[in-house]
Image (spheres, grey):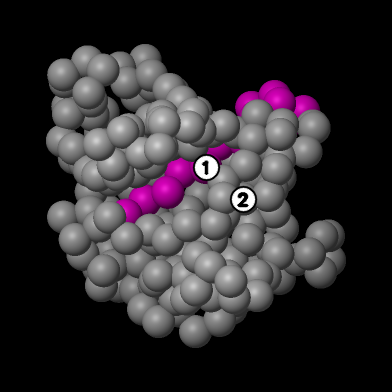
Amino acid sequence: MHGKDRKPLAVIEEGAMILRGWALADAEPILFGVEQGLLQSGLRQMLTPGGKKMSVAMSNCGAWGWVSDRRGYRYVSKDPETGQPWPEIPAALFRIAQTAAAKAGFAHFIPDACLVNVYVPGARMSLHQDKDEQDMEAPIVSVSLGLPATFLFGGAERRDPVKRIDVEHGDVLVWGGPARLRYHGIAPIKMGDHPLLGARRMNLTLRKAR
């Protein structure tokens, strides 16, 4: 969807919604808060359990941080690289996540983890499920900043058909309930230059891990 075709709120399926431009007004304070946190826990390209380096650079903020290495996928309360707690979720981001979740029908969402993903042109995220969280009642809230992307939203099985959804700077996706374990990913990022982030896309994915 582009231009006049971009509806402010659009239901993808039961339990899944995109809120166009929902984070736009707060994009700069959110970005500032996240970048301050990255001074404490910097970006890194994690390894899959099979030993493959991911194309997306990652870090975390919140009480829990998602990590991947040869030991597997898991949440930890301290950054393995520093031994220190992860930085706090920026207040503006926390507020956006709560209001977007409520708008999508998930009241009282209290995220305790935020995965920071930074994509450069060519980087992608293969189809996967978010299933390392203990609390499956809470939704996933995904905030897009910087370069546009194509969000891939599949079904309950990896082989199910995939919807391709354009996401732009300030858009927020929410999925939970019957859509909570849908396979999803990001198609390779195209070349571009964004006023705030240059040739990068930042995705902030908020969850209730514990």
Q: Residue 122 appears in which quarter of the rendering?
A: top right
The residue that disc 2 covers is 186
Residue drawn at (21%, 64%) of the image = 135
- Precedes in sequence: disc 2 or disc 1: 2
Instruction: Pick the residue in front: 73 or 84.
Output: 73
Q: CB atoms at circles 2 and 1 under 8 Å apart?
A: yes
Residue drawn at (83%, 60%) of the image = 3
Residue 108 lies left or right of residue 163; in this view the side is left
Could you tell me if residue 29 is visible in this image? no
Q: Circle 1: is it few (<14), some (14-19), or many (20+) Cα within 10 Å?
A: many
| Image depth: mark 2 or mark 1 in front | 2
Verify whether residue 197 appears in magenta.
Answer: yes
Q: Secondary structure at mark 1?
A: strand
Residue 164 image offset from top left, x and y in percent = 70, 64
Checking the image for residue 15, the label placed there is none
* Amino acid, disc 1: Asn
Instruction: Pick the residue in front: 174 or 93.
Output: 174
Q: Residue 191 appears in which quarter of the rendering?
A: top right
Residue drawn at (41%, 31%) of the image = 51
Could you tell me if residue 147 is visible in this image? yes
Q: Secondary structure at mark 2?
A: strand
Checking the image for residue 203, the label placed there is 1
Q: Which residues are magenta?
A: 193-208
